[in-house]
Image: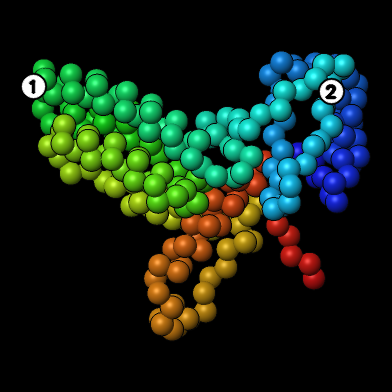
Amino acid sequence: MGLISDNDERAYLEEIIHLENWCQENNLLLNVSKTKELIVDCSKKQERHYQPVRISGTMVERVDSFRYLGVHISQDLSWSCHTNSLAKKARQCLYHLRCLRDFRLPSKVLWNFYTCTIESILTGNITVWFGNSTKQDRQALQRVVRSAERITHTELPDLQTIYYKRCQTKARRIVKDPTHPNNRLFSLLKPGYYASGVPNDWYVDVVVFTVAFLWFSFACGIPSVSRGD
């Protein structure tokens, strides 16, 4: 990860050179064919043109999105590409769920199949992307859940509920682990502050945002946030 500031690419290109030199010194070989360059430009100015990146004389492919740890990250930092991929993959599994139903298997078996396959696909790394996904993207994923409900004739948990529960579980694990590098980002509320009229959803959203930010920081190699004295 490198930073391009004031349209000056020198620091960014120097980081790539340092990485290449470090790999050579440690007898490591970079696979340029599997290396991708993703530029995130949040400015509203006209489209800028950046120098091509070369490693060992080979040009690195520049992409609009790439998959990292099962999550599609786009250059506009939206999650439409990722949710579209999940919806497509999950809809393919609905066919197998219908086949099991046609075999007249018990509802418990259908529910187990849904949980192990379709729900697993839809909720993979959900604490990272669901909170910032658009309403349209969420509805597309939820339609898959509704289709599964009609097939299994059972009520299935919605994605919003799963999202909140997993964020809270992750936050509790960090709070209980004093050795976790991000444990200091969580602090207990003062007595009586919880009942001061602040909506409960506000606390949930804070926990959800913190968990999502921590995962994204880890995935992108961003150092943990530190507070100065």
Q: Quadrant of the C terminus?
A: bottom right
C-alpha separation, residue under disc 2 versus residue under disc 1: 58 Å
Residue that appears at 69% across and 34% down:
38
Seen from the viewer's position, the closer of residues 95 and 167 is: 95
Of residues 12 and 212, the one drawn nearer to the viewer in this rendering:
12
Q: Is residue 41 visible?
A: yes
Q: Is residue 51 above or below residue 171?
A: above
Q: Amino acid at mark 2?
A: Arg
Q: Which residue is mark 2?
A: 54
Colour pattern of the rendering: rainbow
Residue 165, position in %: x, y? Answer: 38, 52
Residue 51, quarter of the rendered image: top right
From the viewer's perspective, is 169 left or right of 31? left
Disc 2 is placed on an element classified as strand
CA neighbours of label 1 inside 10 A, class few (<14), some (14 to 19), many (20+): few
Question: Which residue was labeled with disc 1?
Answer: 104
Instruction: Give the residue at x 76% y 22%.
Output: 60
Q: Is residue 41 left or right of residue 143?
A: right
Q: Earlier in the sequence, mark 2 or mark 1?
A: 2
